[in-house]
Image (tube, rainbow, N blue to C red):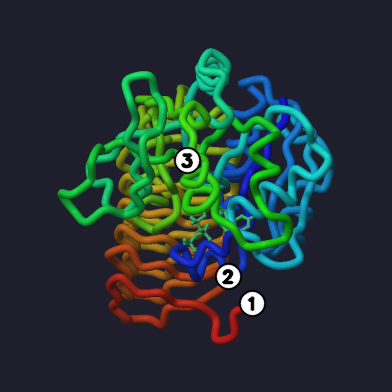
Amino acid sequence: MKAVVLVGGEGTRLRPLTFTTPKPLLPIANRTFLERQLEWLGAHGVDEVVLSLGYLPDAFRDRFPGDQVAGVRLRYAVEPEPLGTAGGIRFAAEGIDERLVVCNGDVLTDLDLGALVRFHEERRAEATIALTRVEDPSAFGVVPTRPTGEVIAFVEKPPPGKAPTDWINAGTYVLEPSVLSRIPARLNVSIERDTFPRMLDRPGRLYALRSDAYWLDIGTPEKYLQAHADVLAGRLGRPPVPGASERCPGVWEQGEVDVDAGARLEPPVLVGAASRIGPGARIVGSVLGAGCVVGPGARVRRSVLLDGARLEPESEVIDSVLGAGALIGAEAIVADHSVVGADATVEPGTRMSGARVHLPAPPH
Ligand code: GTP
């Protein structure tokens, strides 16, 4: 089975991380998100994936130089300009004349794709959408269905309390090739706002399957942190970090790490290879990438540090994300879903809450 994965978005809500790294190439618990997704697709019988992209294409080629990842053959369809979700699918699926799986490149899930395809076949649907239930559907595309699963409507971002159901479009689809011919070529078109709603003018074409599988859109700093917490809690499978050694229950290390005897690590914690944690430092419920440095007395709580991020002595990072090579000066406090971009510096003694910090001229 072939799949198209949509990875062309700029990931604006995760800036400044996404100024330098496209969202699908950000790590989740020290493993590239897209690699996780390709493995999931491969495990469900997908043997070829076309990446539909345009934003920072070289970053993808650099990360996956070969044409095989996790047993899946990889191809690239680089859009001349952003074509939206439907336009991107149409462009990427050029020359494909068979049933296709499509997924957003920013959804962490263990959805049973095989069950979605079987449901699609049983209904003889033209397109089938996976649905997931969320507590507050007001930020999503809500999809009410009949008992048979046939889609009744698409309600985009309903006002709080006004949604007809809690079930939302989970961003995974099974499409017959005829759906592709409904998408105009080389135009910016959205599948969820244009193509699917138009298909409702005749019954029997569009179905949706409700799923209770794990599902998370990783697209905001809060959700990106949540994804890490969920992986470490084993919600996406066990062991949470394959290949890592468990220093004590819930504290994993990858390769050689240097943890001072006077440092405290409170689970769940993942420490990437060659990281150093100094005396009196405290790491609580966090992930450190490879080559990170946490200086003496520094504290990291419920946060994510990408490779090579550094904390100088007595600094503190709480509920925040540090990009690769970011530097937090001594006694600075970075808190409340702050995001520090790659190689950016927070000056010593600074206090910031919900901040975005990046180098003066993002390479964009
Ligand atoms: P935000 O800017 O933070 O909203 O993130 P985003 O750019 O990823 O947008 P959104 O979350 O709405 O996109 C959903 C999925 O579609 C993501 O996997 C994006 O990579 C992808 N996507 C969005 N726009 C395009 C596009 O124009 N072309 C392609 N190929 N993919 C897109």
Q: Please, what is the three-letter code of the amino acid marked with disc 3? A: Asp
**Mark 3 highlights which residue?**
201
**Mark 1 highlights which residue?**
364
Q: Could you tell me which residue is drawn at 18 percent across and 49 percent down?
A: 162
**Mark 2 highlights which residue?**
19
Q: Position of residue 196 (x, y in %)?
A: 51, 43
Q: Where is residue 307 in the image (x, y as percent from the top left)?
A: 57, 56
Considering the numbered disc 1 on the image, is that residue within a helix, a strand or a loop? loop
Q: Position of residue 233 (x, y in %)?
A: 35, 32
- Whether residue 132 sits left or right of residue 326 in the image: it is left
Viewer-closest of 358 and 262: 358
- Whether residue 187 sits left or right of residue 291 in the image: it is right
Q: Is residue 135 above or below residue 249?
A: below
Tell me if I can see residue 67 in this picture. Answer: yes
Q: Between marks 1 and 3, how big is the CA–CA gap?
A: 41 Å
Q: Earlier in the sequence, mark 2 or mark 1?
A: 2
Viewer-closest of 122 and 260: 122
Q: Earlier in the sequence, mark 1 or mark 3?
A: 3
The quadrant the N terminus occupies is top right
Select label 2 or label 3 by which is in front: 3
Asked if labels 1 and 2 touch by Cβ distance under 8 angstroms, the answer is yes
Q: Please, what is the three-letter code of the amino acid marked with disc 1? A: His
Viewer-closest of 89 and 299: 89
Q: Could you tell me which residue is drawn at 34 percent across and 43 percent down?
A: 142
Considering the numbered disc 2 on the image, is that residue within a helix, a strand or a loop? helix
**Disc ID at residue 312:** none
The quadrant the C terminus occupies is bottom right
Q: Could you tell me which residue is drawn at 76 percent across and 61 percent down?
A: 58
Residue 360, by quadrant, is bottom right
